[in-house]
Image: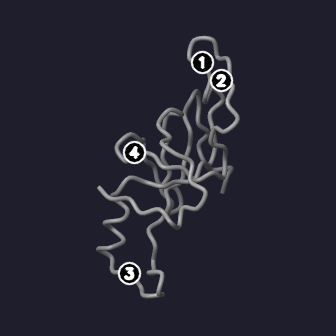
């Protein structure tokens, strides 16, 4: 699958959107309305790949010194209206700028976002 995904250029980051939960914590299947409402909120997504200039100075190309930038595999929270969206094999991916990551999330299953 990774070989068919587009590679981000510059300071872009490719993320994969977290799918809405199918079941409640108690094991009850959620209705489509609940899943749809969750999918329109701000998103929690997994970093897939990072462009070569992510977290670099825009003029010099020098990488900023920081120990904890998001890396592939990390779960992050990003705003919902700032991404370029695409779908590949029924999965939703988005390109974002490196400065659009709001937070790194250790466990995406506990995140609930209210709009």
Q: Which residue is mark 2?
A: 64
Instruction: Say whether disc 4 or disc 1 marks the residue closer to the N-terminus.
Output: 1
Q: Residue at x 42, y 41 (%)?
A: 84
Element carrying mark 2: loop
Q: Which residue is mark 1?
A: 57
* Figure quadrant of residue 57: top right
- The 10 Å Cα crowd at callout 3, few under 14, some 14 to 19, many 20 or more, is few
Instruction: Say whether disc 1 or disc 2 marks the residue closer to the N-terminus.
Output: 1
Element carrying mark 3: loop
Q: Which residue is mark 3?
A: 30
Q: Residue at x 50, y 40 (%)?
A: 101
**CA–CA distance in space, label 2 to label 3:** 43 Å
Q: Quadrant of the N terminus?
A: bottom right
Instruction: Say whether disc 2 or disc 3 marks the residue closer to the N-terminus.
Output: 3
Q: Quadrant of the C terminus?
A: bottom left
Q: Is residue 84 left or right of residue 76?
A: left
Q: Nearer the viewer, residue 25 or 15?
A: 25
Placement of 19 over or under 99, stated as above or below: below
* Figure quadrant of residue 43: bottom left
Q: Which residue is mark 4?
A: 79
Colouring style: one colour
Please report contact status of discs 3 and 1: CB closer than 8 Å, yes or no: no
């Amino acid at each position: 699958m990774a070989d068919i995904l587009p590679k981000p250029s510059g300071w872009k980051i490719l993320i994969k959107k977290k799918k809405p939960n199918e079941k409640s914590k108690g094991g009850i299947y959620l209705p489509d309305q609940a899943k749809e409402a969750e999918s329109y909120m701000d998103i929690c997504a997994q970093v897939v790949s990072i462009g070569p200039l992510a977290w670099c100075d825009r003029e010099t190309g020098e990488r900023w010194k920081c120990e904890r930038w998001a890396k592939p595999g990390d779960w992050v929270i990003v705003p919902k209206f700032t991404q370029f969206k695409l779908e590949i094999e029924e999965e939703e991916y988005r390109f974002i700028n490196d400065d659009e990551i709001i937070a790194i999330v250790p466990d995406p299953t506990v995140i609930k976002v209210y709009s």
